[in-house]
Structure formats: structure tokens, C-alpha cells
Amino acid sequence: MSEKINSVSSLSDNPEHKLCSIIDITLDMVQEYSMLAKTMALEIERVSSKDMADIEEKYVTKFLNVAVSNIRELIPESCFEEQDAMVLSNLLMASCFLWAHSALLQKHAGDIEAYKRILTNLFLNGLTNN
């Protein structure tokens, strides 16, 4: 997933397009590997603290930092501070991974394309303060 996101991020200069692509890629992968995403969510609670530190380091360096750099390009100074980009990136990724775990969310969204639209609008309109 991080390779796909990195490649899309390097192809475009448009931060809105990059963020849309990150959401599309992440949700497509979560949908395709939904059982893996569910299993990982359950098993992460049982991981040792040393292993968790390794997982977090890889997650942050290979995945979240790409989203962070793209989100920073969109943040209006009046709404968020620059250091808020990591929290916003975490919120975005958690929202994507939630798709695999919440039957209620899937019921209300209807399908993954509708959920992509909702997340994209939420993050683009929220980040750009439109």
C-alpha cells in the first residue's frame, strides 16, 4: 500500500488529487484484504510492546508520513497548525480501516464508492475550509 501511495504522490503536484488518490488506494486495499484488516485489528492488541514499537515505526515512516506531507499542503493556517497533520493523517487512515470493521458504517454508507466520496469531501472540505 505504501508503494502505491508513494507512486501516486510523486505523479501529481495537485494536493487535492493526491489526497483523493490516497483515500482511493487505501479503501481499495482495505476492501480487497478486508479479512486481513479485521484480523490485524484484533491481533494488534496482543502484540508485545517491542514489536508494537517496530510496527509503529514502519507504519509512520512508510505510510503515515506520505499522507502527512500531502495533508500539510492542504492545511489552511487559520484552521490547523502544521503539527496537526500527523493527527489528521491518523484520523484519515483510521477512517479508511474502519470500513472493514463496521457493518453499521457499511450499511449507512451503502457501498465503498459512497464512502470514498464521503471521506474525500470530509477531508478536502474540512482541510481547505470550504
Image: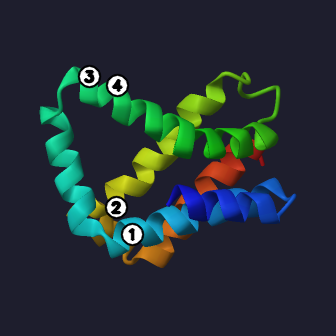
Q: Dot 1: what SS?
A: helix
> How much space separates mark 2 and mark 4, taking CA atoms?
25 Å
Could you tell me which residue is drawn at 15 percent across and 44 percent down?
A: 43
Camera-near label (2 vs 4) is: 4
Could you tell me which residue is drawn at 47 percent across and 48 percent down?
A: 93
Look at mark 4 in the image and give the residue it sits on.
53
Badge 3 crowding class, 10 Å Cα cut-off, few under 14, some 14 to 19, many 20 or more, is: few
Task: Pick whichever of labels 1 and 2 is earlier in the sequence.
Answer: 2
Q: Dot 4: what SS?
A: helix
Badge 4 crowding class, 10 Å Cα cut-off, few under 14, some 14 to 19, many 20 or more, is: few
Look at mark 3 in the image and give the residue it sits on.
50
Residue type for callout 4: Ala
Q: Are marks 1 and 2 in contact (CB under 8 Å)?
A: yes
Q: Dot 2: what SS?
A: helix
Seen from the viewer's position, the closer of residues 49 and 105 is: 49
Would residue 68 be seen by someone viewing this image from the given angle? yes
* Residue 20: numbered disc: none
The image shows residue 25, relative to residue 62, as above or below, that is below
Q: Are marks 1 and 4 in contact (CB under 8 Å)?
A: no
